[in-house]
Amino acid sequence: MTGRDLLGNRLLCGAIGVAGLFCLLEAAGRTRLIDPDQFPLASTVVDRAASIVQDGEFISDVASTLGIWAVGLLIATVIGVTAGFLLGTIPGVERALRPIMEFLRPIPSIALIPLGLSLFSDRFDMKITVIVYAATWPILINTMYGLKDVDPIAKETLRSFGFGRLAVLWRVSLPSVAPFISTGVRLASAIALIVGISAELLGGGSEGIGSYVLENSGGLDAMEYIIAAALWAGVLGLVTNSLFILAERRAFRWYSARTEVV
């Protein structure tokens, strides 16, 4: 089976699953297994989602969320990759910083939003800081573990030909760890989107999907707006994740082939 056929099958299965869930929720609302006064019908939510995407204010809020997401993810990538190489190539640095990492990593990023509000008067700086903190960890960890997967024979071969540490790092370690970094960035992209929207919800402000939800959460049809906005947030996450997967497959075909052989 070719990659195109596999992708087509996945899309078909995904479409069937979404259609099945829609029909199930719609039937549950129509038969009042789920109270439509508390939770709107699936068809109502879809109609609301189709209407808000035509709203210029909502499109502007989506663009604002994506802008913060992109900036935060870019900064997290630079920090995560740099720190990952330092920790993964210098054992003394890893031993010294490992206790700090194990202490900070389990702290929920959402819990840091109130702290960010007290430290930063600018909402943009607060959102970026929280996103960077949350998104750095998967990139950092994947970079470190990717370095441990580098073939030691390849490194020793280059050293035997007189190449220095930086040359070995550039010619062997970086290409080998690149797929791990890519996976870390893909995981971090979803985390960054979740944390960014959460920061908009909890931190206030006038821009972003979270702010749009807050502004429209006081009316009689507030639940429709909330679920419709959440639906579009899920679509954004799905699209960005799919784009990252497609880029990984194109950029690292050699790695996919190697893992399939293994």
Image: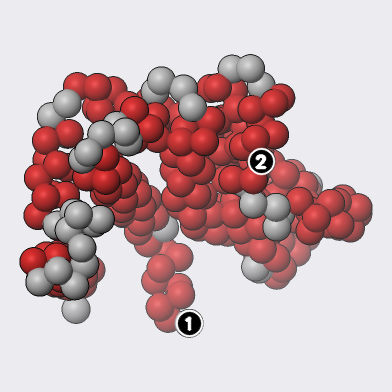
Q: Nearer the viewer, residue 154 or 126?
A: 126
Pick the quarter of the image with the N terminus.
bottom left
- Label 2 SS: helix
N-terminal of the two: label 2 or label 1? 2
163 displayed left or right of 91 = left
Which label number is shown at residue 112?
2
Residue 181, percent from left and from top: 55, 52
204 displayed left or right of 78 = left
Confirm whether residue 146 shows in the render. Answer: yes
Q: Residues within 10 Å of mark 2 (few under 14, many from 20)?
A: some
Q: Judge whether 229 appears above or below 141 on screen.
A: above
105 displayed left or right of 70 = right
Q: Judge whether 100 appears above or below 82 on screen.
A: below
Which label number is shown at residue 262?
1
Residue 89, percent from left and from top: 78, 54
Q: Nearer the viewer, residue 111 or 152?
A: 111
Q: Amino acid at mark 2?
A: Leu
Q: Judge whether 69 appears above or below 154 on screen.
A: above
Q: Residue at x 72, y 44 (%)?
A: 83
Residue reaching furthest bottom? 262
Q: Residue at x 44, y 50 (%)?
A: 190
Q: Amino acid at mark 1?
A: Val
Q: Residue at x 37, y 61 (%)?
A: 253
Confirm whether residue 171 shows in the render. Answer: no
Q: Nearer the viewer, residue 56 or 256?
A: 56
97 displayed left or right of 233 = right
Q: Quadrant of residue 250?
A: bottom left
Residue 192, percent from left and from top: 49, 43
Residue 126, percent from left and from top: 60, 27
Of tags 2 and 1, the one toward the viewer is: 2
- The Cα–Cα distance between marks 2 and 1, rounded to whole angstroms, is 42 Å
Colour treatment of the image: secondary structure
